[in-house]
Amino acid sequence: MEIIVATRNRGKLGEIREALSDLGIALYSLEDFPDVPEVLEDGETFYENAVKKARETAWHTGKLALADDSGLVVDALGGEPGVYSARYAGEEADDRMNNDKLLEELKDVPENNRTARFICVIAVAFPDGELITAHGASEGRIMDAPRGEQGFGYDPLFYSVEAGAGFSEISRKEKLKVSHRGRALQELKEKLRKWMNTSGTEAQ
């Protein structure tokens, strides 16, 4: 059984591979399918973007495709950056630029008002149109400066209430226990296992 993960983000792919490793599924990324075009993420919700990416990738490859849309929701910013998290500082922005903009937007906001959460929606699309989805969230707050050496994206600025540390200060294994993506992946794993059992599909 093979699934194409609709991402070129190595950090995201690594988390997905680790979380689903015990299913015995072969996971590939868009790096393995360079002819698959980029999907325009023009949905208004994480769910819409995840489903669109999964379905278009499944259509182009003829294989099961997994896509996630994740983002940071900051209360003091009215929910921003939200679905625009990856391009908060512009279409060509990188992680550092996005983090710098977030810190600038929150420079006058006191610590107790810097509450935020990561949200993740994962979709697995089948070439025949079948769809499996899962959701996860993680509560925390935005720190006033980057901390730690792990993670990617906004991880250096996100303090996890449950972990008692920043996402970039804990290992990938620890992060998966409390993160938005980790929770969505756990839900997805159970749904995939059930699907594999009922369909008689065996991982190769």
Image (cartoon, grey):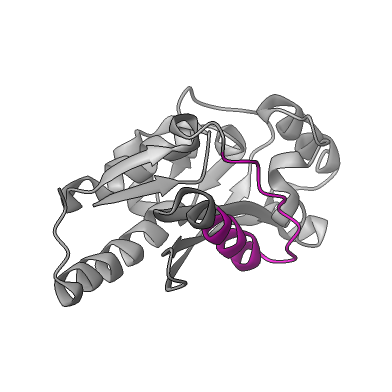
Q: Position of residue 6 (x, y in %)?
A: 51, 46
Q: Outermost residue toward the top?
A: 149
Q: Which of 39 and 98 is in front in this view?
A: 39
Residue 170 vertical position relative to residue 132 in the rendered view, above or below: above
Q: Position of residue 126 (x, y in %)?
A: 41, 65
Q: Residue at x 66, y 48 (%)?
A: 39
Q: Residue at x 70, y 51 (%)?
A: 114
Q: Nearer the viewer, residue 47 or 36?
A: 36
45 within the magenta span: yes
Query: Magenta part of the protein: which range?
Result: 36-56
198 within the magenta span: no
Observer able to see residue 151: no
Q: Which of 109 and 89 is in front in this view?
A: 89
Observer able to see residue 48: yes
Q: Position of residue 93 (x, y in %)?
A: 76, 30
Q: Quadrant of residue 194?
A: bottom left
